[in-house]
Amino acid sequence: MINTALCLPTPDIEALIQGRLIVALPRMFLRPGQTFALYPVDIQSQLPYEKYYRASFLPVANTAVTHQGVLLQPPQLSLVAQTEQLQLPLLVDETVQVKAWARCEFCEILDNTAPLDVLSKLTIWAKEALQEILQQRQHIFFAYLRVYQLSQPQDVSANLGQKERLGKFIGLPNSLTASEVNSVLSDNTFAIRKQQLEKRQPLLHQELQELLGALTPVNIPAAKQLEQDIQIFLGWRRPLLAASNDIDLSWIRKIAEVGNSSDGHSFEKLVRRSLLKLGFTGSKLNPEGSGGAGGMDFYCEYPYPVVGECKATKSEKVPDGTPAQLLKIGMNHLGKTQYESAVKLIVAAGELNTFAKRTATENSMNVITPKTLQKLVELQTNYKNSINLLELKECLQQAPFGIADEKVNKYIDKINQDIKLRAQLVELVKKYLENTGYERASVDALHGFVAGASIKIQPQELHYILVELASPLAGYLGRIKGEDWRRDRFYYLRDLQIS
């Protein structure tokens, strides 16, 4: 139970919750182990943000909100018996949301010998702001905080945290229940960040941090997704459960259902959306476009041509007309050479009759069910870019043709096994560093540890996968490049969660 709160500027708390910051500037020395809530205070009226924060952090500072007005309806008054009540105006109860609590891990006292320019680059505060604090107080308390988010934000009266209490403690009217379940940073990530700051080491990815500042005010889904991905890569936040925040899941989970219905028009749209989600592009993949009679249901142009038909069926068998139509329309629209070089794909729910099976098999067509397509798209959604379209092409170009669910499902199983292996390797890197106390590890050291976990893998293959996991697009591990592959060093950033 937490009964006190440390009053900090709203942007500072936002930075702590985002994981981009691990220190605060209290007005007094904090004891290691001391716990408290983080109470936001608006300081902009006292000091312009432009002078207090670094330029790259200003977009975040300007979007941070302290007060939330809660509208209250006062009791109605009846001035005269048996008449309408007098409607009193709404009142505004000023509150702030307390979203997190913290535990002090260490507290430094900085004097005029401190490298303020370096500390400014490693935090969110402008060098001039740190200089002014040092000049006013003769020293700066530099508190390293381990931050945990509350399971539910708590509304607290705004009158408690007057600006003169900035950097000081206040009592809370009601105790907060603190839990360590929702830690902003993992143990290992916090330890690495703390050591980096204590030793005044330069930032590893300063360009990405600058990019984050530019992304903050861009309010479109793609920008917000990139912002989150960068934060996860930098170790500033833990990843959400796989695909739990993907807005496309609502339609992806309907692919099999609609495919097993009589709504062929809607099914065509879902198939085109699915191909786009897998990474295909092409002018004939407009989800709102029309295909069907006289036109191809879909046609992918990049990274390789895929021509296909959709057949939603509720109970009837798929007739020979479906593969025959693909053959006829494909040849008419693409020409013989282009059609024969393209991958042929039919997505149909019903069982193929004898003639349809023979036509599809003899003309190198792949027929998969909506359920199999849904599994492919869900895998791509759960683990971004896990579907390698060139590998999928090899799968679809190999016999057997006709009913192709089995070979596509084998490819899906292979991808799942690859993901499982990578999740195991990330976990083993984490355990190795925790067991040894090292900050990073070589390929040879990790290979010995991995072999002890009964995973058979050659050192060079292990290195290849570790590099993949440490790429900016993955961000599960970090990598310090050496003179050759054996001199590379790897460290843990975040878990690869398997849903």
Image: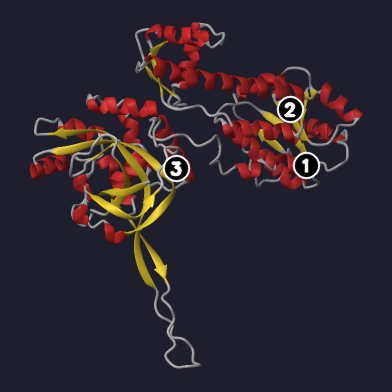
Q: Is residue 232 above or below residue 488?
A: below
Q: Which mark is residue 294?
A: 1
* Among numbered discs 2 and 1, the one appearing first in the sequence: 1
Q: Is residue 280 visible?
A: no
Q: Where does the image place residue 199, in percent across and percent down from the top left?
A: 22, 24
Residue type highlighted by circle 3: Lys
Q: Which mark is residue 170?
A: none
Q: Where does the image place residue 337, in percent across and percent down from the top left?
A: 72, 23
Residue 30 shown left or right of residue 497 in the figure:
left
Q: Residue furthest front?
A: 1
Residue 324 shown left or right of residue 212 in the figure:
right
Mark nearer the viewer, 3 or 1: 3
* Among numbered discs 2 and 3, the one appearing first in the sequence: 3
Residue in the foreground of this view, choosing between 328 and 115: 115
**What is the distance, in whole Å, between disc 3 and disc 1 at their CAs?**
41 Å
Residue with the mark numbered 2: 344
